[in-house]
Image (cartoon, rainbow, N blue to C red):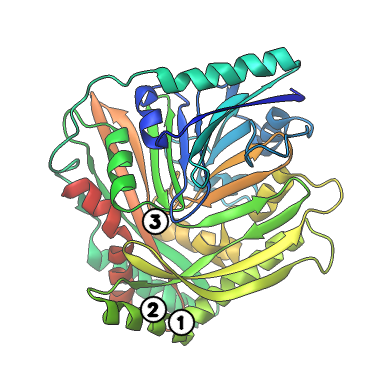
């Protein structure tokens, strides 16, 4: 697939370009928010897998050898989209983790896509092939997706999930207290502990309705919609996991530290300032920065790991977050599959030390499935980008409807207060909860 064809078309909103394909297995939209430039719509992959003895090798084989891309095109010019469940980490360290009904790693390869340039306000159709004619035909086929009319479906009014139920708050606070005790006992330094919200979509409501409502109300940098057979993922994640350029430059941006948004401007500024000044939150963030530095060093030349930004406050619809940036380079013949194996699961949603924190999490939570995993794209040219699947909803078809689960967690450290950590989870789930219940 060495040839690449690019065709342009007038601007369309990516969410509504996806609408005609909302029920199609392996239809996927990766939609940026907050000033990001590129969104993507993908469908009709030529190869897929969701079961493999060695999922990292299967991913590398599906991606194949590195191929050139067009320097005038978007960052993603065809390749693999993958959904890595949190339990994929059990394939790296033997932790005997229990599983949900989601696969550890589901991947699909796409040789055509639509890229939506939010800055230039145009759509770029990308096609790949062995010949120029084959690449052009695939690009024209992708461009034709814009001409498909969505079936008439009324937009749901009222709650999408009238029975959304939160896990017992007292049980969550008890779990936080246990983690604090284990930290004070020297077992770990930090662990991210989550609680769940569960329910069913109302009759006639489907996962795309939730995706569209979230995008309208609180667009996030890593919004995504993915349909798999019998399953769907809707993500409103603010957090990047790993990004790699075709020349091997790596960037990760772990989030640790949260405050709710204020009711008015002065309160909002005060909450952001308090987050930046918080010794607890800075220490929590720094632990994960050090963990990510260690993970990246496994696949990077000595001395290439750097921290160009530490403790930056970024603001989203419902919360302020403390975000740091760690950079590195892929060493020698290392690939993005090697990087994923070295770094997964994301440090920001496990803890430190990572392996022991994962053991503690497994004792206190049921299997996570997609939550705290990653959704990624991997280009045929070696480029890669991925999100941490927080602020995400996993949906499963059941009895003619959709069962759903969402979770929100908090990083627990030695001076964590159980009630304060529970309230943090409620601030984090607020945008999802509003979209589902109002």
- According to the picture, the residue beneath numbered tag 3 turns out to be 365
Determine whether 113 is above or below 247 in the image: above
Dot 2 crowding, Cα within 10 Å, few <14, some 14–19, many 20+? many
Residue 373 higher or lower than 204, as above or below:
below
Left/right of residue 188 with respect to residue 276 in the rendered view: right
Residue at 43% across, 51% down: 33
Which percent across, then down, holds residue 327?
69, 63
Which picture quadrant has residue 111? top right
Q: Give the secondary structure at mark 3.
A: loop
Mark 2 in CB contact with mark 1 (< 8 angstroms): yes
Residue 252, disc: none
Tell me where residue 53 sits by quadrant. Answer: top right
Q: Secondary structure at mark 1?
A: helix
- The residue lying at 27 percent from left, 74 percent from top is 262
Q: Could you tell me if the residues under marks 1 and 3 are in contact, i.e. CB atoms within 8 Å?
A: no
Q: Tell me the residue that label 1 is attached to.
A: 276
Q: CA distance from mark 1 to mark 3?
A: 30 Å
Nearer to the camera, 45 or 85? 45
């Amino acid at each position: 697939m060495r040839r690449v064809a690019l065709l342009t078309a007038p601007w369309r909103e990516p969410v509504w370009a996806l609408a005609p394909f909302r029920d199609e297995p392996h239809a996927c939209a990766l939609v940026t928010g907050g000033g990001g430039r590129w969104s993507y719509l993908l469908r009709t992959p030529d190869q897929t897998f969701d079961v493999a003895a060695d999922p990292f090798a299967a991913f590398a084989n599906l991606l194949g050898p590195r191929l050139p891309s067009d320097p005038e095109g978007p960052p993603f010019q065809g390749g693999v989209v993958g959904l890595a469940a949190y339990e994929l980490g059990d394939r790296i360290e033997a932790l005997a983790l229990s599983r949900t009904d989601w696969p550890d790693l589901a991947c699909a390869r796409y040789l055509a896509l639509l890229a939506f340039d939010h800055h230039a306000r145009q759509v770029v159709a990308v096609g790949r092939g062995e010949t120029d004619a084959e690449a052009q035909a695939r690009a024209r086929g992708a461009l034709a997706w814009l001409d498909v009319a969505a079936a008439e479906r009324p937009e749901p009014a009222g709650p999408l999930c009238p029975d959304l139920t939160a896990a017992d708050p007292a049980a969550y606070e008890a779990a936080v207290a246990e983690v604090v005790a284990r930290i004070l006992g020297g077992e770990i330094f930090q662990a991210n502990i989550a609680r769940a919200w569960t329910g069913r979509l109302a009759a006639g409501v489907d996962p795309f309705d939730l995706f569209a409502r979230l995008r309208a109300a609180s667009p996030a940098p890593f919004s995504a919609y993915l349909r798999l057979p019998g399953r769907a993922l809707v993500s409103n994640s603010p957090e990047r996991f790993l990004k790699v350029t075709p020349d091997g430059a790596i960037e990760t941006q772990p989030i640790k530290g949260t405050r709710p948004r204020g009711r008015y401007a002065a309160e909002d500024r005060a909450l952001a300032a308090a987050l930046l000044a918080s010794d607890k939150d800075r220490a929590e963030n720094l632990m994960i920065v050090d963990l990510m530095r260690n993970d990246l060093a496994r696949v990077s030349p000595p001395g290439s790991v750097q921290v160009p930004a530490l403790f930056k406050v970024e603001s989203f619809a419902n919360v302020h977050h403390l975000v740091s940036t760690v950079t590195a380079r892929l060493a020698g013949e290392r690939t993005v599959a090697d990087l994923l194996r070295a770094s997964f699961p994301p440090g920001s949603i496990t803890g430190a030390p990572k392996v022991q924190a994962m053991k503690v999490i497994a004792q206190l939570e049921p299997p996570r499935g997609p939550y705290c995993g990653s959704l990624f794209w991997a280009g045929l040219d070696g480029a890669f980008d991925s999100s941490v699947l927080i602020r995400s909803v996993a949906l499963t078809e059941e009895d003619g409807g959709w069962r759903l689960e969402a979770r929100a967690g908090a990083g627990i450290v030695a001076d964590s207060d159980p009630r304060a950590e529970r309230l943090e989870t409620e601030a984090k789930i607020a945008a999802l909860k509003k979209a589902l219940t109002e």
